Image: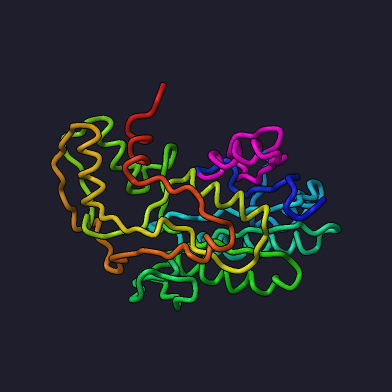
Amino acid sequence: MSPGAAGRILVTGLAGFTGRHLRPLLEQHGHEVHGIAALDEPGAAQLHAADLLDAARIAQVVRELRPQHVLHLAAVSFVAHGDAAEIYATNIVGTRNLLRALADADTPPHSVVLASSANIYGNATQEPIVEDCPPQPMNDYAVSKCAMEQMAALWSPRLPITVVRPFNYTGVGQSENFLIPKIVAAFRRRAPEIELGNIDVERDFSDVRDVCEVYRRLIALAPGGVFNVCSGEAISLREVLALAQELTGHAPAIRVNPEFVRDNEVRRLRGSGAKLDAAIGRWPRHPMRETLRWMLLPGP
């Protein structure tokens, strides 16, 4: 089998937000998709219950599946998650357990794509942010992802690792713990008021469907290195609210709650996707209006 050929792929976090959109895309392109999911998630024929912190179980799953490709999405990904120990354990030690199992496999995979985060850049002063911008992590989640990347580099001599740093992305099915789904839910139920934090922060948002296409191409090409995954545009939450109002005709009162404003708030993030484009070709980028329309006005 050539490195880019469709084959058996192992996706950690397959039952999560991104994984649920990614699976049909991979299957459409001929992959046999298997997943590792938390022990309390619903089971399926190709969803293997395992805890990333259980090194023996992870090694067992890898031995049984012998995947040609691996995409590691599973992580504690909510920045405001209250358990720092769980963040560090899952995102660093859990990833190490997976890489160790893959490196020890009789047949190493053709590609290993690890999901890091653009949060590692923090309040970067350069714009747009490119991959060699010095990390300035501003919270435990970002620190854990930065450390994960450093740890993963130890395995690069034995594994074909590609690291992605996705900026913010959203879409149908994302938890309301995240800001855009929270806003969408309020507009869909026509709430009279929405309570938010700083609505003037600006973020580089992508559509989850576009991010999945990026991952699919990286799995096939296995370019190695580190890549931003971003739209290349920054939009403020104030602009998102205006778009939602335009699409729905609803105009809720916006109340800024100081308790929702983090002291270490990253004010603006806008990435450069030039390196990624050069590696995989231009990929689809839904504008925020289309993403919000999909989330606010879903079809039957």
Residue 226 is situated, as x and y percent measured from the top left of the image, at: 56, 67
Q: Is residue 197 above or below residue 180?
A: below
User: Which of the 4 quarters of the picture holds residue 6?
Assistant: top right
Residue 83 is situated, as x and y percent measured from the top left of the image, at: 45, 59
| Residue at figure coordinates x 33%, y 76% from the top left | 125
Q: Is residue 91 visible?
A: yes
| Residue at figure coordinates x 65%, y 66% from the top left | 224
User: Which of the 4 quarters of the picture holds residue 149?
Assistant: bottom right
In this rendering, position of residue 248 left or right of residue 217: left
Q: Is residue 81 visible?
A: no
Q: Is residue 155 above or below residue 53?
A: below
Q: Is residue 208 above or below residue 236?
A: above
Residue 115 is situated, as x and y percent measured from the top left of the image, at: 56, 58
In this rendering, position of residue 201 left or right of residue 112: left
| Residue at figure coordinates x 60%, y 43% from the top left | 14
Question: For this rendering, which residue is in front, 229 or 252?
Answer: 229
